[in-house]
Image: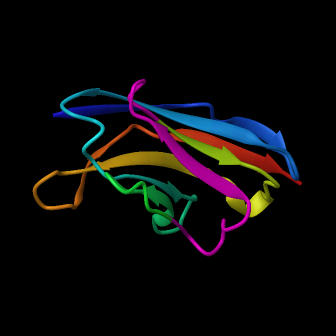
Amino acid sequence: QVQLVESGGGLVQAGGSLRLSCAASGQTFRQRGMGWFRQASGKDREFVAAIAWPSDWISYGDSVKGRFTVSRDNAKMTMYLQMNSLKPEDTAVYYCAAKATTTGQYVYWGQGTQVTVSS
């Protein structure tokens, strides 16, 4: 089992920045691909960013490319999402997720942290 806890959400004005953290505990963190997703009210869940293991290959959703940066610190068992140039349309609950080492599917999810961007 892997437990994930997000933090760092809040209210920010458009153009501002926030850094989200995802702290992991439980089974091996460094051997798992990790990702960030978000869900705005009334909308489907959207892929934001992912960072693979062991290559640390990174991918981003089209809507956040050039503004968001994902990273991980395996020693601290923490993944980060630096969000710059925030827009009102970035308002959502942000979730971190971890993949199963066997299937490569996202099976572990955090409880989410709210990000609200005011115009």
In the rendered structure, the answer to whether residue 49 lies left or right of residue 82 reads: left
Q: Is residue 95 magenta?
A: no
What number of labels is visible? Answer: 0
Q: Quadrant of residue 25?
A: top left
Horizontal and vertical percent position of residue 54: 31, 52
Instruction: Identify the residue at image location x=54%, y=64%.
Output: 42
Q: Which residues are magenta?
A: 59-78
Query: Considering the image in quadrants, where does the C terminus appear?
Result: bottom right
Residue drawn at x 38%, y 29% is 77
Q: Quadrant of residue 13?
A: top right
Q: Is residue 58 above or below residue 28?
A: below
Estimate the x, y position of residue 78 in percent, counting from the top left.
44, 32
Q: Is residue 70 left or right of residue 52?
A: right
Horizontal relation, residue 96 to residue 93: left or right: left
Residue positioned 30% across, 39% down in the render: 30
Q: Residue furthest bottom?
A: 62
Looking at the picture, tell me which residue is in the foreground, 47 or 74. 74
